[in-house]
Image (cartoon, rainbow, N blue to C red):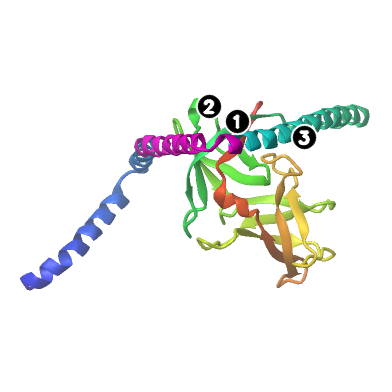
Amino acid sequence: MPPKRLDQARPFLTLIVVILGWLIVPVMVKTFARASFFELQAPISVAASYARDLQDYWTLRLHSNDELIEAGRDLARLNATYEESVQQNTNLEAEISRLEDLLKLPPYANYRSEYARVVRRDFSGWWQRLVIRKGKNYGIPVGAPVIFSGGVVGRVSEVYAYTADVELISSPGVRLAGVIEGETQPISFQGGINATFDPPKGVIEFVPLNVFASAMMPKKLVTSGLGGVFPPGLSLGTVTKVEPSADGLFKSGEVQLDPRLSSLTEVTVLVPLNPE
């Protein structure tokens, strides 16, 4: 081979050698190298997250007294509303406990709520995930459900010393059972193929033929509780389209997910108190 062509092909030959070398490396070494990479990268991401929080703090300190007084009034109104909601929630919980005892129903699985700050978001075609600022140091397990005020965020896919990865429900790798609100027949939900800047969406399969939904008449999709990972009744999204499947036995459709998934700053991890 002429020297000129050899120089041009050298980068490709180097890449091929690296790929072949990586393929023959034992799986244990690959796993250790991957975990070590994320552990070394975590302090940088966490430090950047704390820096953003500090920047937000000093930004708020620059507001005028009038703006702070008005914000305090708004906060007082919200606190009053939340106090009333807490009282109503306490009464509802007591009523649920009474009905469970009366009907001999088993209680829902108990969870510990662990609030976590979002460090980084990855919404490329390959990744649909969040990185949160808590990990093994707070007892977060792999597979734990993650929620926010709008419903389901996703589930914990990887846990490190001080951080954890959360795979979003918009990811095609997430499958779970859901039900149309008010119905009892389970439906298979899966994350969809989402472009970087498009609204998040998912797909549903095995929808009963008697279920109808459209953009003008949407239906709310919630978790069914089957599988024991997610508690029942958590919001997944809104069913905006269903159509007959190829087999004609069921329907399939699309689910519009909460657009706030791409701008979350805090989430809640539901840590089981008695994991099996």
Q: How far apart in space, not on screen, are marks 1 and 3 (Cα)?
A: 23 Å
- Amino acid on which disc 1 is placed: Glu
Q: Quadrant of residue 156?
A: top right
Which residue in the structure is indicated by mark 2?
138
Asked if the residues shown at circle 2 and circle 1 are in contact, with their CB atoms under 8 angstroms apart, the answer is yes
Are there few (<14), some (14-19), or many (20+) residues within 10 Å of tag 1? Answer: some
Q: Classify mark 3: helix, strand or loop.
A: helix
Magenta: predominant secondary structure element? Answer: helix
* Residue 35 place in picture, x, y as percent: 39, 38
Which residue in the structure is indicated by mark 1?
114
Which residue in the structure is indicated by mark 3?
81
Q: How far apart in space, not on screen, are marks 2 and 1 (Cα)?
A: 8 Å
Q: How far apart in space, not on screen, are marks 3 and 2 (Cα)?
A: 31 Å
Bounds of the magenta span? 40-67
Q: Residue at x 8, y 71 (%)?
A: 4
* Residue 134 place in picture, x, y as percent: 50, 32
Closer to the observer: label 3 or label 2?
A: 3
Horizontal side, residue 272 vs residue 97: left or right? left
